[in-house]
Every structure is written in structure tokens, then in C-alpha cells.
Amino acid sequence: MKAVRAGVWTRERALLLLPAALLLAVVVVVPVLRVLMLSVNRVELEDGFRLHFAGIEPYLRLWLDGRWWTALRNTAVFTVSSVALEMTLGVAFALVLHRAFRGRGLARALVMLPWALPTAVMALAWAWIFNDSFGVANDLLRRLGLLPHPIAWLGQPVTAMLAMVVADVWKTTPFVALIALAGLQAIPEQVLEAARLDGLSAWQRFRRVTLPLLRPALLVAVAFRAVQAYGAFDLVYVMTGGGPGGSTETVSLYAFQNYFRYLDFGYGSAVATTGVLIVTALVLALVRLARPRAEAA
Amino acid sequence: MADLTGHDLVKVFPDGTRALDGVSFTARPSRVLTLLGPSGCGKSTLLRVIAGLERATSGTLRFGEAPFDELPPGRREVGFVFQNYALYPHLTIADNLGLALEVRRVPRGERERRVRETAEMLGIAPLLGRRPAQLSGGQQQRVALGRALVRRPRFYLLDEPLSNLDALLREGMRAELKSLFGRVESAVIYVTHDQAEAMSLSHEVAVMRAGRILQCAPPLALYTRPADLFVATFVGSPRMTVWRGRRDGSMLHTEGAALATPAGLGGGDQLDVGIRPEDVEVSDRPLPGGWQATLEVSEPLGARTLLTLRIGGATARAMAERREWPARPWVRWPADRLHWFDASGRRLDPGGPGGSGNR
Amino acid sequence: MTAPRGGAPRRTGGPRDRAGTATAGRGVPAARVLWGLALALVLAWSVGPAAWQALTALKPDAQITHVPTVYLPHPVTWKHVETLWSRKPFGTYLANSAWVATWATLLCVSFAALAAAGLARMPGRGREPLLLGLLFLSLFPPILLLFPLYEGVRWLGWINHPLALILPYAALNLPLAVWVLESAFRQLPLELDEAARLDGLSALARIRRIHLPLAMPAVATAAILVFIFCWNEFMLALTFMTTDACKTVTAGIASVSGASLYEIPWGQLSAAIVLATLPLVLLVLVFERRIVSGLTRGAIKG
């Protein structure tokens, strides 16, 4: 019998992994390399589009590009707000769902719904909800007496960003909630009972026992979500188109515009690459910072 | 320190299970009361009700004169030792021990002092800086104990604390626990399904079954005068041999042999009679008043040999000297070592039913 | 006073708990009501926006643009749905989405099954880095890949061809599928593998006859998750499919967006949104358990 334990690589294993590896290489690895290559090129319109090597010039251009910084700032604001809200809401939802009750499966399915629906399509729905004349948001707020006159949500920078964040939070909270729920279920019941007997109140139990034990799972959730929020395209494109006046334009959208509207693929690649580098660095830093305290030896 | 008493406690779970069916008990300071019984008998439920982790459906709990049914678990001042220890995985041992004190705002200096004292008493002082995952099972168990001890609670509740330890460790810990219990002022309520533990550690044992206490008595009384057939067969190892028979005049006719019923024994036509293997007399030579048996199995256990014998149409067991036994030894059941029970399992004494058992 | 909210309730499984499932709310009625309220809010929030679209789709035009907002349609009208069906090539969009998603899922799960089988029996030394690498690849924002893929698709002449979407979708979902399948395969007893080997079965045969059948739940989970992602994908679909005949439903609907949202027939659009999302709603309701377990598996291990 073949020594399964002896070596890591056997011919059989290599063959099994080959199809997936090939597909990933073609669809992911090669494009990434190509983007890197494109990013150090300049695009000139001379019978067709010709690439001229430009070194780090596109990156310098990026540094001086006000619109890039705006996009970066918008992306940061969007990501931080979204993730912060999602984490809080997600944990709260998980706490509510953590009991056994009849219809729990149905409740969970309904809570998951936002996550399963296409972002781009629901972005339209949200645009309708935040419509200044006919939208439900304005109507509800007015009925609750919180709003003297309707807000033009998507017509002003701050409110447009807010609306986008709400839409994103709606869509992705289920993901965090599910992870938090699984984390909650992994906490041994008896540890919480011991805490009760030690005299901790419900809030103290949550803060001093539940939350610390949830930390590893939440960390994973934050890392995932930060990267995803950063790269969010569907929502921005459909809901606000980057407007009004570029105040909700994110890095992804800016790259897209460079590619397909300005046909400046070199610069677009520089935008995309820099964006990815930044978020990778941040997430790594985040994980490294949190790791030593999260794990027991 | 006052007595901890429970009166007529009933606990019915939402699915209809009647886990506690009218349980009353008294646990006294400095004394160990053990709840002993098979799984499902309600002993753990009772413990949880006392701790406040469950609410009784009816009945009261008192500490001294004061009822404490309404107090939340955190305020009952209970030292609870969980079967699986339930240590806080993310805190150091020192923090695990000190958390309850911290919540009660015990000043830091005193808190640290008490934690250290308790740790030293249990031999875990060098582990104070570690986390539970780094400790062995035995060490974790001591920490769980320490967590209860450091609080100087009103009473201790231990839920099968030794059941997760291997046999060797268990024996050692049993002795330590006994010595520990001898030094505390509070009442101790101990739950176990292991009757050897119960016998060794307790001042009083309450044998439970199906939500009721069948008998609550000092260990030796349970052994010599079990109030109930179930108690008789549950306590004592090896198990008591019990024969069922029909009474005819002054004789009980069983499948094994016929025995003379003592004068004044109540009960009806159907009786059970039992004897502990260690009380059976065995001999090579004929014993007057005895029977000749057929030896089926001989198990040399070390100090003694356990014999499984066939007498008439039934089997019986006898704990005999360690030696080889012939194929047909003689066996006698001394009348003063017999235990008599009526058809419902209640103990019968010559001169009237009942015995030393209460509920 | 203990409020049950914030503390976890009793769960089954402990040796003492013979009483079946734990109950919600240990009896403090006020806290129980609060919890019920919280649950109601959570559900309303989750379902609200989608439900609102459904209501809008059934309203007559006048009520849609009525101020103040009319909440319930009366009478209910099916006009928007009908017009949508007949006017726009909506049916085609749906068919395209289904076609692309199904093939991508099949391809993805097959490749993932092979890879997962290879990884499952690998010693940790080799397996862990590979799984981590896979995770790393899955985190790349798609915008990074978009343009080169576009170049490639154009070069191959695959603009408006389903393969332009099927292959990338399969690739982008490989990490997720491999994660789900690998952990399931790893839990199968090693002895089965070994017995099959002794019986002379090749690796492919083993996968087909042992791994897949025994890990069917995980396969279903992976397939459902991948299908959902494929159906919902937008960026690639928008870029690679330009004609109505080829668009998927996300690109088709969302490409309606533009500068002036006031000119859009919201009734029809709402109907389109509802029809586009209905299959997913059904999927979620039916397969809730699978989806939940699949999503959390990777996260907890990670």
C-alpha cells in the first residue's frame, strides 16, 4: 500500500489538485500579475491603445491625484462604518437567536435572507427606499416625527454615504451574525453558569466571559468583512454611481471608471493595485495586533 | 452557619418530566450530605435547584429560617464545583479563583492573599499564572475546588467532581476531599453515582430514585438497615443477592430454597429476601440449616474470592476466603443477616414493617 | 436580578439534561417580552426591504408615487409583472442566470471535490499552507482581476459567451467549495479509504463512490453556496455581457440604473427585483440549515 503518511506530495495528489490549481492560476494568478504589469505602464492613444513602460510614474500620479485620495477616504469611511455597525448588530442578532424556540429555523432563514439576495439588485431597492420624494425612509421618519421635511438622501454627500452604509450593513450583518452564533454555541454552558454563580450580572457575563471567548471568531469575521467592504463595487455602482459629485466614489469604482470610461488601463491598474496593497497591509496589521492576546498558549 | 433545608421540592420540566417529586432534606454545617443514585434520579437537578440554576416548581429552600428561593444564583453565596470544572478558559488560574471576589469588590490585597492561601492549601500555587488549557485534569479539578473554597461560601455543592478523573487519581482525591471537608464550617452537599465515594465521604447519604429520596441515613445504616429494596441492592458491592418467594405459613418458598420467615414479620404473601455476599457462610463440610450448592463461577479478587453459586433454581453470590473451592460447597444464610422486603420493596422487620428509612 | 438576554440559555447534551430542548426564557416574564420584541425587530429589519419591493410590485402606479406613502396595495395589481414579462427580455435574463450559475456550480464543485480529496489525506505540514493560500486567494477584491480577465475574454472572442462567466465564477468560488468539502472529507474514516485502495479502486473511483456519496450533505452545502454567489455576481456579468440576449439577471436589472432615477418605472422595476430574487428566497428557506453550517464552518476553523 502506498505510504500515505510518508511524503506530502504523491503523484496522485498532485493530479487531484491540478485542475483546481490550473483554473485558479488562469483566473486569479495570471490576472494579478498582469495587473501589476499594467500598473507600471502608460496608455497612449496611437492607432489603438499602446502601452508604454512608465515605471513608477503612474504611482506618482496617484499620489498627486486628489480624486484618488477622495476615493480612498470614502472607502475608509465606508469600510470602517460598515464593519463597526455590522459587528455590533451581528453579535446582537446572534444573542437574540441563541435561544431554542419554535420556528428557530425559519427565523434563521429570514435573518439570512439579506445576505443571499444579489447586492446589485437590492441596491436598486435601497435607492427606492431612500428616494427623496417617494421613499419609505423619509416617510417612516416623518411619521415617527423625527423629520420636519424630506431628506434628499442620495443627493447630498453625507446622507448618500449613510444610505450606502445602511444598505451594506443590511446585506452583510447576517454573515457576522452566523459566525457569532456559531461562536456562542461553542461556549460551554457550564462556564456561563459558573459565572452566574460567581455573581456576575448578565451584562458582566457578556462583557467578561462571552465576548472574550467570542474574540477569535469575531476576528475572523472582521478580517473577512474589512476586505469585502473595501472591495465593494456592486452597491456603489448601482445605488449612487459614486455621486453626488464623487462623494461616495470608492477605490473599486474609481478603478472601474479608469478602465472603462477613460480607457486608461494602466492608471486603473495602479489604482486597483495600490488599493489592494493598502487593505492587505491593514488586515495583516489588525490580525497581528490582536493575535497575541486572543490565543491562550 | 445555619442548616440548609429543602421542603417538599418538586420540579417539573416543560416537557413533562417530573425530575423532583417532593424532596425534603437537611444539610448541616460541617457535615457532608451525599445525594446518591443512578442517572436520571434527580440528584443533579436537586443540586441545580439549590444553586438557583433551576427554579423549583413548588416547595421551599431555607438557610436557617430565611427562605432564599427568590435569590438569584449569584447572591446565594454558593460554592459550586462542576463536573466538567467549567473554568474560564481565557483567564489565568489566579483570575479564575479571584473572579467571584472581584465581583464582590473585595479589596485587591485581601483578594490576592486569599487566592494564594487557597492555592497553597490545594497545592496549585505554582500554577497561578497559567491558563486552564495548560493544566492536567487533576490540576483543573483542584482549581475548580479552589474557586469554591476561596469564597468561603454558605454551603458547598459538588456535582460528581471526581467522575472525570482516572481511577488512581480518583482514590487520591477522595482522601484529600475527605480531609478538606473535615476542615470547613459550611455544609457540603455532594452528588455522585459511585456508592464507594458516597460511603467514604459522607456523614449522611440520601439515596435517590425517580425524583424521590428513598432513604437518608448515615452510610453504615444504609448498609446494615436499608429501608428499601432499591437501596439494599444499590448500596454495597458486590450486590446483594435477592430472592423472591411465596409465603406459606412460616416458610418462604423461593426458586432457590425455602427459608423460615421470622416471627412477627408483616407483609403479604409475596416477599423478597436478600443477603449480602459477605454475610454468606461457605464451607466444604455440611452446614446445619444450610444447603449444598453448585459452584458456577469462582472469581479470585485478591483478598477474597467471589463465588457465584447455584442453589436449587436460583443463583446466589458469596464472598469467601481466598482458596480453591470444591464443585459442591455448603452454603448457609444466617437468619440475623437476612433482609426482608414486602412486595412494594419496603423493608420489613420482625415485629412490624418500616425501618430506619424516612422518605 | 438576572435577565436572560445576554446570558446563554440551557442547551441539551449535558448528562443531567434529560428534559429535551431548553426553553426560551427561564420564567422572568418581562425579560421574555423584551426578547420577543427584539426578535420581532430583527426579523422585521431582515425581511423589510425585500417585502417592501414585493408590495411595490403589486401596487398600481398611482399608489407607488403617492405622498404620503401608501403601504398596502389596494387593489393588488399584477400589471407590472405582466408588462415586465412581455416587454423586457426578462425571461431570457433569468434563463441566462440559471444556465451560467448551474454550469459554474457543477464545474466548481467537481474541481473542488478533486482538490479536497487530495488535500484531505495530506499531512498537515503540506495541507495547512495550501488551505491558507487558498484563503488568501479568495480575499482578492474582484476589481483587481477584472481588467485582465476582460482582456482575456475579448481575446478569446468570448464577449457575450456564457463561458466568459462560467470559468471565472468556478474559479472564484473554488476556495469556498474546497474549504467545505475538505473538512467533510477529512472526517470520513481513514479505514474506508484504505479498504477501497486494497480493493483496487483508483483515486477517481474512490472519490466518486466513497467520498461524494458519504459527504453528500457537504456537497449540497457547497453547491448551494456557490450557486448563490454565481447568481448574485454583478461586476463580471456587467462587463462581459453587453447584449440583452446574454445578460444575466443582475446585470440586466441593475444596468437600468443611471443618472435619473425618476424616469424609471418603479412598478416594473420592483416586479423585476422580486422575480430576480425569488429563486434565492426559496433556496434560502428550503436549505437554511445547510447554508448556515457551510458558512460558519470555515470561519470557526479559521
Image (cartoon, coloured by chain):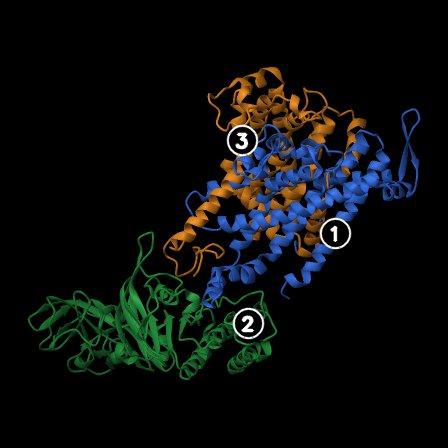
Chain colours: A blue, B green, C orange
Q: Relative to B278, is B86 above or below?
A: above
Residue A137 falls in image quadrant:
top right
**What residue lies at 59% left-to-right and 76% top-to-bottom?**
B127
Q: Which label was assigned to residue B107?
A: none
Question: Mark 1 belongs to which amino acid?
Answer: Leu
Say left or right for B82 vs C136: left
Disc 2 is placed on an element classified as loop
Disc 1 is placed on an element classified as helix
Residue B321 falls in image quadrant:
bottom left
Say left or right for C237 vs B245: right
Q: Residue reaching furthest front? A: A148
Closest to the observer, B355 or B285: B355
Dot 3, crowdedness within 10 Å: few (<14), some or many (≥20)?
Answer: some
Q: Which label was assigned to residue B136?
A: 2
Q: Which label was assigned to residue C52?
A: 3
Say which of marks 3 and 1 sits in front. 3
What is the x, y in percent for residue A7?
71, 55
Dot 2, crowdedness within 10 Å: few (<14), some or many (≥20)?
Answer: few
What is the x, y in percent for residue B74?
44, 67
Q: Is residue A249 visible?
A: yes
Closest to the observer, C254 or C225: C254
Say which of marks 1 and 2 sits in front. 1
Q: Which label was assigned to residue A282?
A: 1
Question: Mark 2 belongs to which amino acid?
Answer: Ser
Cα distance in 3D space between marks 3 and 1: 38 Å
Say which of marks 3 and 2 sits in front. 3
